Amino acid sequence: MKFNKILLVFGATLLVVIACFSSIWITKQSHSGGKQIRNMRIAPVVFVPGSSASINRFDDLFTALNKGRRAKDKYSVLKVLVKKNNKLVYSGKVTDANHQPFIVVGFEDNSDSYANIKRQGKWLDIALTDLKKRYHFRQLSAVGHSNGGLDWTEYLENYYSSSDFSIDTLMTLGTPYNFSETSITKPTDMFRDFRDGATSLPSSLTVYSIAGSEDYTTDGLVPVQSVLAGKYIFQNHVKTYTQITVSGSNAQHSDLPDNTEVIQLIQEYVLGDNNSANHRRARNALKKEVEPKKDDDQKDNKDN
């Protein structure tokens, strides 16, 4: 009788132990995906398209940047569409293949106006806040084409907090800091607001402003002087500000994200890809045509 009681107690104890270990194993399995993402220590590159462009705007650029890379080293692509009601629609995925995944943040309302730039700055903040909760990154780099660069400027001056994450690099492509004006003597309301709010820009930020040029006055849509007006916003407020002008074929406004020279600049200054032999040859060829100048004084819809 005593033996039976001992056996009963032992059996009950064994069942409890098995149940506990099973619960722990199930918990580990259910959270393994989240832990994998958190342990990736990613530093994404976040791309924002311009007006009239969709979240597919950079697809050709991503194909070019992934060309020649082994499957395990390719940049993964995640796309986030911010709806007018602030809801987020995700497509694609972030993988552990590369610690610099590409993330595109686009907007359902992609119309062209200063009022909408202000709304998009807020929407960009909503998207980045949610992305930070999902992927727990501590730093990112930013790229904006056309009005996408204005969205980044609006965000950095009015929403960004370094306590959330650091933004190391901002590269803007054909961004019209003074809209369609050809002279800084005719400042727009947006330009004045950006200039006056520049003290809020992160002092650790490195900025590259890329201008396209057909004839050294315009890229076919945006006046070169409007792009150059960025220096009056960023210079003396960020760590470094570098102005670069590309010309020749595919230097028109809508072609800039797919321009060979621009792709090489992204590889070097945003991705830090300085090691491959192909990149070194491309960089040397690029230096013959365009030198970065430090100034002291869509795929379906091509955007504005």
Image: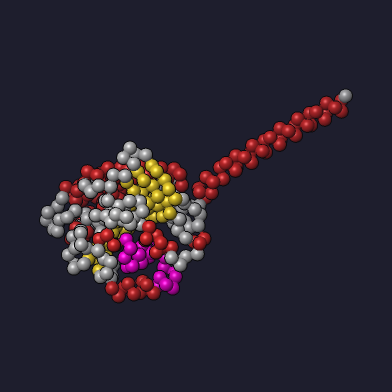
Most distant residue in the front direction: 300
Quarter of the picture containing the N terminus is top right
Of helix, strand and loop, which mostly describes the magenta segment? Answer: helix
Question: Is 268 contained in the magenta span?
Answer: yes
Residue 109 is drawn in which quadrant? Answer: top left
208 left or right of 114 in image = right
Residue drawn at (60%, 42%) of the image = 28
Q: Nearer the viewer, residue 192 or 27?
A: 27
Q: Is residue 10 above or below residue 72?
A: above
Residue drawn at (35%, 74%) of the image = 284
Most distant residue in the top direction: 1
112 left or right of 87 in image = left
Residue drawn at (43%, 65%) of the image = 67
Can residue 234 be seen here? The reply is: no
Can residue 146 be seen here? The reply is: yes
Q: Is residue 87 above or below residue 91?
A: above
Quarter of the picture containing the C terminus is bottom left
Q: What percent of the width, then of the height, locates residue 115? A: 22, 43
Q: What percent of the width, then of the height, locates residue 158? A: 28, 44
Q: What percent of the width, then of the height, locates residue 17? A: 71, 35
Number of marks drawn: 0
Q: Is residue 82 above or below residue 182?
A: above
Q: What percent of the width, then of the height, locates residue 81? A: 36, 46
Q: Is residue 297 above or below residue 55?
A: below
Question: Is 106 contained in the magenta span?
Answer: no
Q: Nearer the viewer, residue 105 or 35?
A: 105
Part of the protein shown in magenta: 257-280
Residue drawn at (36%, 53%) of the image = 56
